[in-house]
Image (cartoon, rainbow, N blue to C red):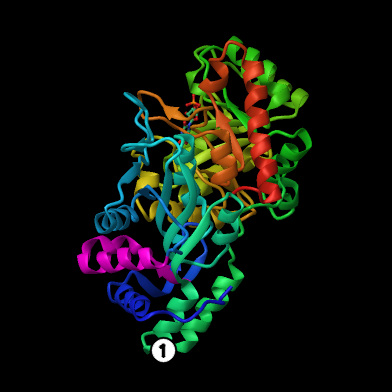
Amino acid sequence: MCSAGPLSAAHRALVLQLADVEAIKFGSFTLKSGIQSPLYIDLRVTVSYPQLLSLIASTLLASLPQSVTYEALCGVPYTALPFATAMSLDTKVPMLMRRKEVKAYGTKKSIEGAIKPGGVVLVVEDLVTSGGSVMETVQPLRDAGCVVTDVAVLLDRQQGAVERLASDGVAVHAALGVCQVLDVLVEEARVDPAVAADVRAFLAANQAAPVTKTYTARAAGVKNSVGARLLRLMDTKRTNLSVAADVTTAAELLRLAAAVGPHIAVLKTHADTVSDWTDDTATALRLLADEHDFLLFEDRKFADIGNTVVAQAGGGLHKIVNWADIINAHAVPGPGILSGLRVAVESAGRSVGVLVLAQMSSAGNLATALPGYTPAAVAMAVTEPDLVFGFIAMEGGLGGEACVSMTPGVKMGGGGDALGQQYATPDRVVGTAGSDVIIVGRGIYKADDPAAAAKEYREAGWAAYERRCRGDQL
Ligand code: 5BU
């Protein structure tokens, strides 16, 4: 992992300047995955240092082999956008720009700029770990007709991105590898050799293991029985599809559940949108779930203090824990919400699994926008593995392989709606972002033939999972 040649004077200067502005720090940091890391790299700060930006641009350009030619540059948003801009100003090569949020109205374009079909685009990225974020820019560029075969990267964490991107036809040209950075900082007495050794050991032990294991292989490590059952069920039934049954009457709900039942692993409900819900609705849903072997997920998104959620989950009109296999909770109230849900589940005397909302699919949602939110939600969830088995998230890998990620906002063709929903394709969600379950609502229940649409989504989600297991894509 740490094999890399000596650095030029410009590269060494760059390392020292990055350390000066604290883009590279040593200590104890909680990563998005919930893992404690002795190293923290945040290159966003570079935007405030124009001299450093221009050194980054010239070093990135100098690190590219002569054989790499390109007609346009495209930075991965956001940190690499100024890098690409500086390279463009240096070389006079034009830029394209990828939108992070695709507009739900107007042109719905995800790539802005003067796109030349068949034009070769060099992608620019600040940091690679698994390569997932690079693919999130490569894929839309390719979808727009551009040719992408190379990415210029400022810093490679040397945790597997080079190999994984190579399997997607993208060669990584990194100006710096993390091991070279450590060497320079030790030589210049900026870092204690013992700290550097710790960091090397951490990197070796944490090679980005995108979850390429099968669902079944992960099930044994899952303490919550519903989570383990879901993982096994998905492999047995060959589906990672959850249908969001957002209909408004009990009759429609039961009709939809019966139609999509053979294709799904999970039926997701919003019981409070069903105008004529009764206990009989829950009983009938349970019968269908048992007949077709799927789980019921009531997407109530509990968000109150422990004492209140005991009553909301156990009582009221819906008595959710009496029939749902899966429920979910916001992390905002703190761990008390999980204690409250535990009380409700235990008094129902059934097996129920909880998902914590670590991210959401809607534009501008604070769970995704606030940098510390997702790690804090993950840290809260992983302390109660017998109750919480995973996350509502836009990506996989949060909390490690014993956690399941379920992702809403899925539709063939992507796009969005007029009220902030942002869609990704099944392939992107399972293949690139590494999530485990796709949640599809309108793409299925609004289709002319919901059963046929469910079959189509099932096949797309499953193909992406099989490719991921083979390590073809990530
Ligand atoms: P759609 O019709 O595929 O857009 O439905 C998505 C469903 O997932 C719908 O039931 C939402 O309430 C639910 N959802 C979501 O879209 N985004 C989120 O972040 C969360 C839930 Br949490």
In the image, 350 versus 225, the foreground residue is: 225
Q: Residue 252, relative to residue 204: is it above or below? A: above
- The answer to whether 285 appears left or right of 156 in the picture is right
Q: Position of residue 106 (x, y in %)?
A: 31, 23
Front-most of residues 315 and 437:
437
Image quadrant where residue 341 sits: top right
Residue 226 visible from this viewpoint: no
At 78% from the left edge and 37% from the top edge, which residue is drawn? 236
Label 1, secondary structure: give it.
Answer: helix
Q: Quick one: which residue is furthest to the front in this view?
A: 67
| Figure disc tally | 1
Residue lying at 51% horizontally and 26% vertically, measured from the top left? 316
Q: Position of residue 67 (x, y in %)?
A: 47, 60
Q: Is residue 171 shown in magenta?
A: no
Identify which residue is drawn at 43% across, 54% down.
Answer: 69
Crowdedness near tag 1: few (<14), some (14–19) or many (≥20) residues, C-alpha within 10 Å: few
Measured as percent of width and height from the top left, residue 425 is found at 53, 33
Q: Amino acid at mark 1?
A: Glu
73 left or right of 410 in image = left
Query: Taking 339 as reference, is 438 above or below it?
Result: above
User: Is residue 187 visible in the rendered structure shown here?
Assistant: yes
Query: Can you say whether 60 is above or below 439 in the image?
Result: below
Residue occupying the point 66% across, 41% down: 465
The residue nearer to you, when weighing 158 against 28, is: 158
* Horizontal and vertical percent position of residue 462: 68, 35
> Is residue 375 or residue 237 the one in the foreground?
237
Q: Which residues are magenta?
A: 38-63
Is the residue 448 above or below the residue 273 in the image? above
For the N terminus, the image quarter is: bottom right
Residue underneath mark 1: 187
Prevalent SS, magenta region: helix
